[in-house]
Amino acid sequence: MPETAIKEQLQALHQALGEHPELDNETKQLMQQVAQDIENMEQGDASDIAAGLKEQVIHFDNDHPTLAAVVRQIIDTLGRIGV
């Protein structure tokens, strides 16, 4: 069940990226890294990934609140599954 929620939120993240073509390259790269980190969670330390996500939300908060909200939802889901 939690994996489904994470996958849905990851899809929302990809969709949000597509809806914001005005994003600068650095922001796009950071968001793509977020998506890649989530997809690779099984292979790495999930707690490190969650900490990195929290740090990246801070960067997106002012300039890209929609993207920050999607990443926060992913962080919340990770927290609910014990990460």
Image: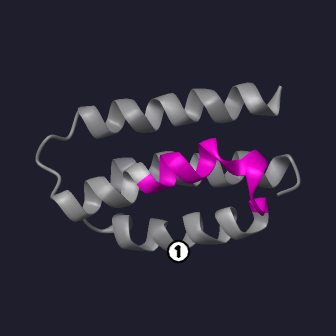
Q: Could you tell whether 54 is left or right of 28 in the image?
A: right
Q: Residue at x 39, y 53 (%)?
A: 31
Say which element carries label 1.
helix
- Residue marked by disc 1: 55
Q: Nearer the viewer, residue 62 or 56?
A: 56
Residue 21's spot in the image, x, y percent? Answer: 14, 40
**Rendered view: 6 above or below 27:** above
Query: Which residue is at a point 78% across and 63% down the rendered structure image?
Result: 45
Q: Residue furthest right?
A: 82
| Residue shown at 58% from the left, 53% from the top | 37
Apparent side of residue 69 relative to residue 45 in the rendered image (left or right):
left
Residue 18 position (above or below residue 43)? above
Residue 83 x %, y %: 82, 57
Residue 43, magenta (yes or no): yes
Taking the magenta stretch, the answer to whether it contains residue 59 is no
Residue 51 lies, in percent from the top left, at 66, 71
Q: Position of residue 32 (x, y in %)?
A: 39, 49
Task: Please identify the quadrant where the N terminus is shown.
Answer: top right
Task: Identify the residue at image location x=66%, y=63%.
Answer: 49
Q: Is residue 47 left or right of residue 13?
A: right
State which quadrant residue 3 falls in.
Answer: top right
Dividing the picture into quadrants, the one containing residue 16 is top left
Residue 63 relative to residue 13: left or right: left
**Does any portion of residue 79 appear in the rendered image?**
yes
**Highlighted magenta segment, given as a residue range:** 33-46
In this view, which residue lies farthest toward the front? 43
Identify which amino acid the numbered label 1 is placed on: Glu
